[in-house]
Amino acid sequence: MKFDELNLPEQLLQAVRDLGFETPTPIQAKALPLVLKGKDVAGQAQTGTGKTACFLLGVLNNLMDSERPEDGSPRAICIAPTRELAIQIAADAEQLSTYLDLDITVVCGGLSWTDQDKKLKAGTDLIVGTPGRLLDFDRRRILKLRKIQAVVVDEADRMFDMGFIQDINALFRYMPRKGVRQSMMFSATLSDQVMRLARRHMQDPVEVKIEAENLVVDEIDQELFHVGNFEKLELLLGLLQKEQPQRAMVFVNRKVDGERLAWKLNHNGYEAVYLSGDLPQRKRLKIIEAMKAGQISILVATDVASRGIHVDDVTHVFNWDVPQDPEDYVHRIGRTARAGNTGRAVTLACEETVRGLIAVEELIEQKIPVGFAEDEHFVPDRAGRFHRTRQVYTGWPPPSLAGGSRSKDGEVPSGGEPKKKRRRRRRRRGGEGGEGGEGGEGKAGGGGRPQTPPTS
């Protein structure tokens, strides 16, 4: 099947051609014909399968059949769990709507409230946002959802993980009832709780599933190493030395491990940056843009911090831990082998996390090939002991962008020793200012000895 066979409007078809797409992906081939017919669809698809283009083409096709209301109310809304994903969806929508006269607005935290307020009041066609900020604007009656024609909930499974379901339910209450609007929902897996949400807010949703064996694409070379927790770093260093990844992502289960691992990698000669969910939004965006531009070779992140990040040409994914949620494994390794490329995914299973391996292999319905680490696979750790400080260590900016030092975290110039802060000398308190009093030797500025009163 070709995109030409899907009866897309010429404006959308030309935008697809401009992006170099000719053949739809499996999720697009199955879901897009239903979406274009106006059906409500619940689709199973992980990151990197083309699901974003699938639902955006459906939304844009819907918008072409109507005009913007006189009051400027939005006609379509896409809800995402993270600001990064919302920003990425909006960017994709801009590309696909090149030949359409539509206004697209991003509504999420971490960006200027004033700017978003102005855009909403000026009128817009499509809103892409996160649940909390959308609800804030709606409750202030700045965002009006009564004329929504199409709604998309992306990464619905993550909405449950992040505690957004009450917000999602509230947003749906402000929209036209199901059957009047078109609704789409996409998730890595269509679990019972996701389908309950779909049936609550969608009119006879059609389930579109990719077969379980296709949850992990064939282009990903998976490998599993059973290793002791105390040997994981040396094995990772050996794998990095052997495979020389051009662009890699390392996933950890805990924030403290991400901070420590980025520090260790940096002090072993690698340019690694830790992406923490605790960082200010401006700094997070800088790190993400640097990763997309190829200025960062290794990005260390937790599953929460990395959600919504779309980076092309990731050659390697390293799982420092077996993920606690098996669906996270699919999300993680889906960062590589995108758009028909090949990729490699390596998992380190230690005694602390190996129990999660059974659930992962049950989900993907395959055994992950086991590799055997020889002595030459282990490279000694040359870094010293990592000491946490109040400021989160990120390794940003890397030396290549900071003129050879990494001082912004207060951690490292090149030698690996923490940068010491200069202590400001405090002025000593003396007696009264001026001449110090009768018969005294006092100095100007209050440094004189206080005068002892005469005795009678």
Image (cartoon, rainbow, N blue to C red):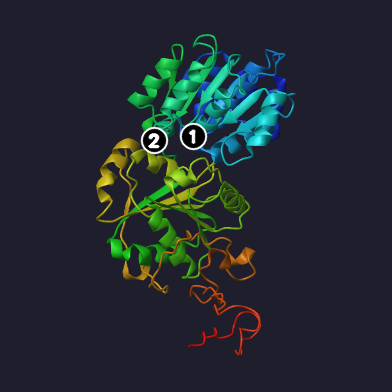
Q: Which residue is mark 2?
A: 161
Q: In the drawing, does residue 404 fall left or right of residue 361?
A: right
Rendered image quadrant of residue 352: bottom left
Of residues 207 and 366, the one drawn nearer to the viewer in this rendering: 207
Can you see residue 265?
Answer: yes
Residue type beneath disc 2 = Asp
Residue 374: give x, y in percent of width and height. Answer: 32, 67
Residue type beneath disc 1 = Pro
* Residue displayed at 46% across by 35% down: 46
Mark 2 surroundings within 10 Å by alpha-carbon count, few (fewer than 14), some (14 through 19), many (20 or more): few
Q: In the drawing, does residue 81 fall left or right of residue 356?
A: right
Rendered image quadrant of residue 258: bottom left
Of residues 165 and 88, the one drawn nearer to the viewer in this rendering: 165
446, above or below 33, in the image = below
Q: Which residue is mark 1?
A: 81
Q: Residue furthest front?
A: 456
Can you see residue 130?
Answer: no
Judging from the image, what secondary structure is the residue with disc 1 in?
Answer: loop
Residue 32: give x, y in percent of width and height. Answer: 55, 21
Quarter of the image with the N terminus in it: top right
Q: Marks 1 and 2: CB-CB under 8 Å? A: yes
Measured in 3D between alpha carbons, the distance from the residue under mark 1 to the one under mark 2, in whole angstroms, is 10 Å
Q: In the drawing, does residue 336 fall left or right of residue 60?
A: left
* Residue displayed at 38% across by 26% down: 190
